[in-house]
Amino acid sequence: MKTEISKLENILPMIPELNLEEIESLMAKLVEAKKVLKPSSYKAGVNIGVGAFIKNLIQTTTLSNKEILVKVVEEYKNENTTTACVAWYRNDLRKKALKTETKTEDKVES
């Protein structure tokens, strides 16, 4: 697909005698090819990864791991993420929260 895009991008400026319909057809193919390469969940300026998305849902909602997984699949069309992944992020956040609590307690006692 990337080769098709570069071919189309190179053809357009080299052939000035193309009529309007041919140019529009080539441009439509180029636009479609670029859509395939771009993730469907991409939003200009707001493109966070799956992990950050999951952590945000864990911290800001009371959703279960299964409910979070449904949201991840809806948002990213990602079939590789499992409830075990969500559980891992939840546990990681708990561990980090415990570490920060311990560190602040240690500083207070000193």
Image: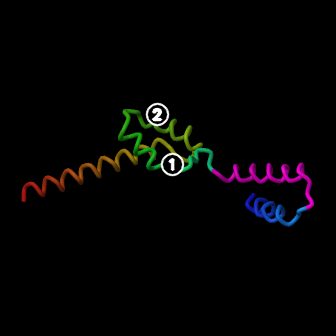
Q: Pick the residue in front: 71 or 13.
A: 13
**Residue 42 position in % (x across, y down):** 58, 48
Identity of the residue drawn at 84% across and 63% down: 11
Q: Main SS type for the magenta part?
A: helix
**Residue 19 position in % (x across, y down):** 92, 53
Q: Earlier in the sequence, mark 2 or mark 1?
A: 1
Q: For the residue carrying disc 2, how many other residues have a C-alpha within 10 Å: few (<14), some (14-19), or many (20+)?
A: few
For the record, the magenta segment spans 17-38
Q: Pick the residue in front: 41 or 87.
A: 41
What is the three-letter code of the residue carrying label 2? Glu
Name the side, left or right, on which 7 lies relative to 45: right
Residue 1 position by quadrant: bottom right
The relative height of residue 58 versus residue 26 in the rendered view (above or below) is: above
Name the side, left or right, on which 103 lies relative to 56: left
Mark 1, secondary structure of its residue: loop
Q: CA distance from mark 2 to mark 1?
A: 22 Å
**Residue 32 position in % (x across, y down):** 75, 49
Question: Does the segment drawn in magenta span residue 14?
Answer: no
Q: For the residue carrying disc 1, how many other residues have a C-alpha within 10 Å: few (<14), some (14-19), or many (20+)?
A: few
Identity of the residue drawn at 76% across and 59% down: 5
Nearest to the eye among marks 2 and 1: give it.
Answer: 1
Disc 1 designates what residue? 46
Mark 2, secondary structure of its residue: helix
Disc 2 designates what residue? 67
The relative height of residue 105 versus residue 10 in the rendered view (above or below) is: above
What is the three-letter code of the residue carrying label 1? Val
Q: Pick the residue in front: 18 or 39.
A: 18
